[in-house]
Image (tube, rainbow, N blue to C red):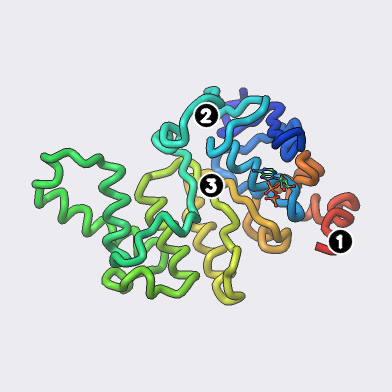
């Protein structure tokens, strides 16, 4: 496998009781790029994503991460290798402060040894690192806020901060713009661009226009299979893609 491919699927297939949701998908995600997986409702995006992040077991096919076959690995093992999934609202604790949420993620990364808990130096370091991460995602000044009281867009920025605390090489974003108010979409898009520097981002998104300015490469799925791939300019002019998106 080429060195610059960080995620690759070969013949990835998932059947649910005889219904093929993902059919023979060969995906290649290049290291250091923002790659979007898009397609109309029911195209198989979420299933594909869940297969790559190991939330689902494929019926057949292979998943390679950094050249290694991870088809049989557990989700936690994948995260430890640096492929981290974000945008699971439930991953943040609503009654804790914004900073506490980031600190928990940082502690998770370090491990919870007894010795570690007693070290003031480490705990102070976590406080400072949490504030750095908050500032990276545009949440400076929000450290003391109760997470449940954050506006929706800010909550999603916090999720990115907790994900960054795990020092991912690959960030997997599940519909980052879902439910987002119009004014937040641009801000989150900028944030994704910023955090993508030096990393790889694979995102699932329904809306082709949303990914237009963000993605280096777009894979369009339809009925579980790859319909088209390329830059936004390439796929948006593809008559089959236009057809697939009509009425969605
Ligand atoms: P998308 O994310 O592109 O909207 P999904 O991956 O959620 O598409 O779904 C693809 C197809 O697989 C849909 O027809 C959906 O109904 C079906 N599907 C998804 N998950 C299941 C499941 N657990 N059991 C049965 N069918 C499923």
Disc 3 to disc 2, C-alpha distance: 15 Å
Q: Left of 18 or right of it: where is 66? A: left
Indicate whether 58 appears above or below 122: above
Mark 3 highlights which residue? 172
Mark 1 highlights which residue? 246
At 31% from the left and 59% from the top, the residue drawn is: 101
Indicate whether 15 appears above or below 100: above
Mark 3 within 8 Å of ligand 1, using the beta carbon: no
Q: Left of 3 or right of it: where is 235? A: right
Please give the label number shown on residue 66: 2
Q: Position of residue 32 (x, y in %)?
A: 55, 42
Q: Earlier in the sequence, mark 1 or mark 2?
A: 2
Q: Where is residue 145 in the image (x, y as percent from the top left)?
A: 31, 73
Q: Earlier in the sequence, mark 1 or mark 3?
A: 3
Disc 1 to disc 2, C-alpha distance: 37 Å
Q: Which of marks 3 and 2 is nearer the N terminus?
A: 2
């Amino acid at each position: 496998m080429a060195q610059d491919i960080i995620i690759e699927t070969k013949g990835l297939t998932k059947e649910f009781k005889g219904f093929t949701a993902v059919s023979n998908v060969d995906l290649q995600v290049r290291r250091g790029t923002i790659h979007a997986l898009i397609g109309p409702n029911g195209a198989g995006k979420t299933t594909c994503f869940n297969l790559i992040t190991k939330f689902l077991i494929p019926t057949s096919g292979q998943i390679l991460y950094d050249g290694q076959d991870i088809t049989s690995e557990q989700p936690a093992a994948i995260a430890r290798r640096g492929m981290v999934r974000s945008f699971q609202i439930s991953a943040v604790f609503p009654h804790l402060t914004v900073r506490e949420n980031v600190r928990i993620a940082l502690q998770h990364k370090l491990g919870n040894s007894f010795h570690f808990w007693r070290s003031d130096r480490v705990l102070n370091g976590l406080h400072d690192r949490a504030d750095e991460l908050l500032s990276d995602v545009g949440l400076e000044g929000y450290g003391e806020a109760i997470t449940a009281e954050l506006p929706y867009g800010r909550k999603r920025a916090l999720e990115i901060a907790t994900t960054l605390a795990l020092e991912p090489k690959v960030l997997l974003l599940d519909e980052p713009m879902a439910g987002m108010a119009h004014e937040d979409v641009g801000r989150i898009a900028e944030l994704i661009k910023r955090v993508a520097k030096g990393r790889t981002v694979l995102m699932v998104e329904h809306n082709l226009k949303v990914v237009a300015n963000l993605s280096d490469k777009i894979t369009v799925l339809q009925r579980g299979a790859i319909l088209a791939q390329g830059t936004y300019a390439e796929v948006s002019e593809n008559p089959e893609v236009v057809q697939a998106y009509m009425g969605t």
